Image (cartoon, grey):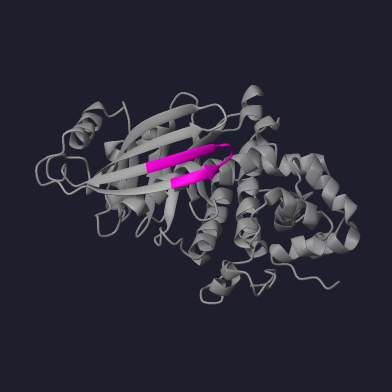
């Protein structure tokens, strides 16, 4: 693939020799419809998106910083990006991003992200691709009254790559937004994980109908299902063969032990769509310095049969859902300062969020685990930033 540096010791890149690469981003940007009128149109739309992506690879947090990045690197970089004049100013970027066709823009970037996920090597305990559904609020924009501030996202467990987003209306919640989001995704042969809020019958049914599988946490919003699962593990039925996996992690001043136990006792008894197993997950956290302890027990359901999902694999999938916070949300808030973003007009908050997601996905794909450090490195190497999106330029 043009723009992907070859590092022979990187196992991800060795794997990538065996599979199709995702298209270069510059080609994806060229496919996004330009709704601007021809008269007065000074800058190609694909060049604007390429500029934004390269600047965000460097660490740009706003369209003003994107414009500054373009000015800093001169005519040669501007021409390589596709500009015939000087790179656009912040006001031009504001106008263009405000009127972008958001749904088509996100759909094209989502298709590219799906290609990225398909090119990543499977995890040792999750060989099938897994997708986490999770919500995030663009808080700075909410203070300014922008529409569609809360976004429900679908993120790949591998790398935390965002596959799709959907706006959650202020008058509704994530439950109503999840169906349109699922319709954007390829679910066949994939596993979908989610928090308890999205543990709903119609969501489970949709995932199963589309050829996917689910792993759902069950809490008080499904009282009967939760009570049935709790009873299975409190008073196991005669002949119920329960299996358990355990992990222990040390770090950050604590010792965390997790035990996940599975059961098939509710198969044929519960009418939950696609139910194949239920599980109990216990977490015991000890803080040696203070002597404090924290104990939590949660329950869950899955459509994965035991031969496809051992307790160890289910534990990995549940942990993968929790790790999305670190792989995506934390990076967007800390590295890109998304939570304090004050952009509020038109589609700008969503366009900027989609570009951040794409930038993170690109860096994860090319082997960068520390996104902030990658930005510092690329700040001194603009040609490498261009190469990552598919533009080759000789030194």
Q: Nearer the viewer, residue 9 or 222?
A: 9
Q: Can residue 151 be seen here?
A: no
The residue depicted at 70 percent of the width and 63 percent of the height is 388
Tell me the quarter of the image containing the C terminus: bottom right
**Residue 386 in the image: above or below residue 96:** below
* Numbered range of the magenta stretch: 248-258
x and y percentages locating residue 58 in the rendered image: 77, 51
x and y percentages locating residue 180 in the rendered image: 41, 42
x and y percentages locating residue 280 in the rendered image: 29, 39
Q: Nearer the viewer, residue 183 or 84?
A: 183
**Residue 216 in the image: above or below residue 287:** below
Q: Nearer the viewer, residue 393 or 277?
A: 277
Is residue 255 located in the magenta-colored stretch of the structure? yes
Q: Main secondary structure of the magenta part?
A: strand
Q: Is residue 305 left or right of residue 88?
A: left
Q: Is residue 208 left or right of residue 352?
A: left
x and y percentages locating residue 379 in the rendered image: 82, 54
Q: Can residue 276 be seen here?
A: yes
The residue depicted at 36 percent of the width and 54 percent of the height is 313
The residue depicted at 74 percent of the width and 41 percent of the height is 61
Is residue 62 located in the magenta-colored stretch of the structure? no
């Amino acid at each position: 693939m043009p723009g992907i540096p070859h590092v022979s010791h990187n196992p991800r890149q060795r794997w990538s020799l065996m599979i199709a690469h995702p298209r270069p981003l510059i080609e994806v940007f060229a496919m996004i419809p330009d709704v601007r009128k021809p008269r007065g149109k000074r800058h190609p739309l694909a060049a604007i998106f390429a500029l934004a992506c390269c600047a965000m690879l460097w660490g740009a947090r706003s369209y003003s910083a994107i414009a500054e990045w373009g000015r800093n690197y001169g005519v040669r970089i501007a021409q390589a990006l596709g500009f015939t004049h000087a790179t656009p100013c912040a006001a031009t970027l504001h106008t263009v991003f405000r009127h972008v066709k958001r749904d088509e823009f996100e759909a094209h970037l989502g298709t590219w992200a799906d290609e990225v996920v398909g090119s990543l090597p499977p995890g040792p305990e999750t060989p099938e691709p897994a997708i986490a559904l999770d919500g995030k609020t663009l808080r700075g924009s909410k203070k300014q009254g922008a529409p569609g501030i809360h976004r429900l996202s679908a993120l790949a467990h591998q790398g935390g790559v965002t596959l799709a987003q959907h706006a959650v209306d202020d008058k509704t919640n994530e439950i109503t937004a999840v169906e349109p989001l699922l319709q954007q995704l390829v679910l066949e042969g994939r596993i979908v994980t989610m928090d308890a809020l999205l543990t709903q019958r119609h969501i489970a049914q949709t995932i199963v109908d589309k050829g996917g599988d689910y792993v759902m946490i069950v809490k008080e919003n499904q009282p009967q299902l939760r009570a049935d699962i709790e009873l299975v593990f409190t008073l196991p039925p005669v002949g119920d063969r329960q299996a358990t996996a355990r992990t222990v992690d040390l770090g950050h001043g604590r010792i965390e032990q997790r035990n996940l136990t599975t059961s098939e006792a509710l198969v044929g008894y519960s009418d939950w769509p696609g139910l194949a197993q239920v599980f109990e997950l216990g977490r015991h956290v000890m803080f040696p310095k203070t002597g404090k302890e924290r104990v939590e027990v949660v329950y869950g359901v899955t459509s994965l049969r035991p031969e496809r999902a051992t307790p160890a694999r289910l534990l990995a999938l549940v942990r993968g859902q929790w790790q999305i916070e670190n792989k995506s949300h934390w990076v967007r808030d800390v590295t890109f300062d998304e939570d304090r973003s004050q952009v509020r007009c038109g589609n700008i908050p969503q366009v900027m969020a989609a570009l951040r997601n794409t930038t993170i996905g690109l860096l994860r794909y090319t082997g960068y685990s520390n996104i902030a450090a990658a930005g510092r490195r690329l700040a001194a190497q603009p040609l490498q930033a261009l190469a990552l999106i598919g533009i080759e330029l000789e030194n």
